[in-house]
Image: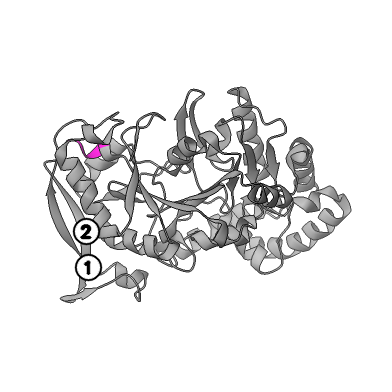
Amino acid sequence: MAVTLVIGAQWGDEGKGKIIDVLSKNADIVVRYHGGNNAGHTIINQYGKFALHLIPAGAFHKQAKVIIANGVVVDPSVLWEEITMLKNAGVSFANRLMVSPNCHLIMPYHKILDRLFEEAKGKGKTGTTGRGIGPVHADKASYNGIQLDDLFDKKNFGEKLKVQLQLKNKILKCFDEKPLDQKEIEKTYFDLFEKLKPFIKEPYTLIQKAIKDKKTIMLEGAQGILLDNNWGTYPFVTASSTVSGNVTAGAGIAPRHLNHIIGVAKAYTTRVGEGPFPTELLNETGELLRQKGGEFGATTGRPRRCGWFDAVLTRFAVELNGITDLAITKLDILDDFEEIKICTGYTYQGQKVDYVGGNANFLAKVKPVFKTMKGWKKSATGITNYKDLPKEAKDYLKTLEKLTGAKISYISTGAKRHEIIKK
């Protein structure tokens, strides 16, 4: 049996989609267990190029059951669009896709409130994706949520929606927004429900049986660890917990069943949206990383902020989550650099400091301490054997292992599925 969890070891956008796609080749079950369509995993394979936001990245392997577990918040229109897109590309979901009825629904008012709250914050905005993720989690925590399961009972759904519109329309009125119409929402959601109904099935029993039968399970994390609501750079975080232990809340799998926890990190660092970023490069080097790496969000299209690899934060992610292996992506993007830097520590007011014990305001003021390494100035693109990497690239990777405290078991050298080294 192998229960493998793949999580982001930075601020998201690390290339988890490709790693999950590769590692799901022999999986019996692939599970998305938290987040919503604010996460985007880009995959390139024989079917084409896809940016998935709800369907697990391992869905392309026909033998695998595909599960969206109860920890995921679902926008039904986005889910149906993805199912349709993949079906048109030749991916079959017959007797494969299961969506937990306990998933909370993203409603129209969640997306509107997300936008309004961001606008109201002005310069203090947190940089949300505008997908309604924060408001739907707020409703979930305050007992105001509506679940997929509620759609099976039209009367019950209508009563719950009525209560929420009584609350939400009052808030919208304060922002001079047009009130939402209940009948219009009900029609839209029941139409989508009829399309999605065949896939709405409780997956808990299947998952537990798979564990007992020693099946291979792949768990797919969404956003990066540094966006965790408890351990990330709050308030510049996501609404759900992204740490490894959240597999219990999000998928009903006890932590003791995890055999491998793979943290995915780019060979450099990126971040989308607002928040502190100690190694950010606001110069030509940062722009070069952005252009060479195609650093534009799969979900929002926003340009990503770019900087050197931050070993301090990645080491924290390794410790916090019990990461057993690292997967380093986009190594090839560093091919043309004369020098490459790694952040090995921080200073604040002349004193050495660490990430733990500070906050977002503190992290915005620290100064990174860099180790400078010689670049390889050779192409690493498409290399699939570790021994074929340039010596300087190997030295760089060995240094990352030493600084983060985790072995590097996978190295992505290009966007395509086969462009990867397995050590």
Q: Residue at x 63, y 40 (%)?
A: 66
- Asked whether the viewer can see residue 163, the reply is yes
Q: Tell me the magenta residue range.
A: 332-336
Q: Residues within 10 Å of mark 2 (few under 14, many from 20)?
A: many
- Please identify the quarter of the rendering in which residue 285 is found: top left
User: Mark 1 — residue?
Assistant: 346
- Quickly name the residue at label 2: 343
Secondary structure that dominates the magenta span: helix
Q: Which residue is drawn at 62% across and 61% down?
A: 249
Colouring rule applied to residues: one colour
Image quarter hosting the C terminus? top left
User: Is 128 on the left-hand or right-hand side of 340?
Assistant: right
Element type at mark 1: strand
Q: In which image quadrant can residue 127 be found?
A: bottom left
Question: Mark 2–mark 1 contact, CB under 8 Å?
Answer: yes
Q: Nearer the viewer, residue 126 or 294?
A: 294
Q: Which circle marks residue 288 in the picture?
A: none
Q: Label 1: how many residues lie within 10 Å, few (<14), some (14-19) or many (20+)?
A: many
Q: Is residue 271 magenta?
A: no
12 to 236, vertically: above or below: above
Q: Which of 398 and 288 is in front in this view?
A: 398
Q: Which amino acid does label 2 sit on?
A: Cys
In the image, what residue type sits under mark 1?
A: Tyr
Q: Where is residue 243 in the image (x, y as percent from the top left)?
A: 49, 61
Q: How many labels does the image show?
A: 2
Q: Is mark 2 on a helix, strand or loop?
A: strand
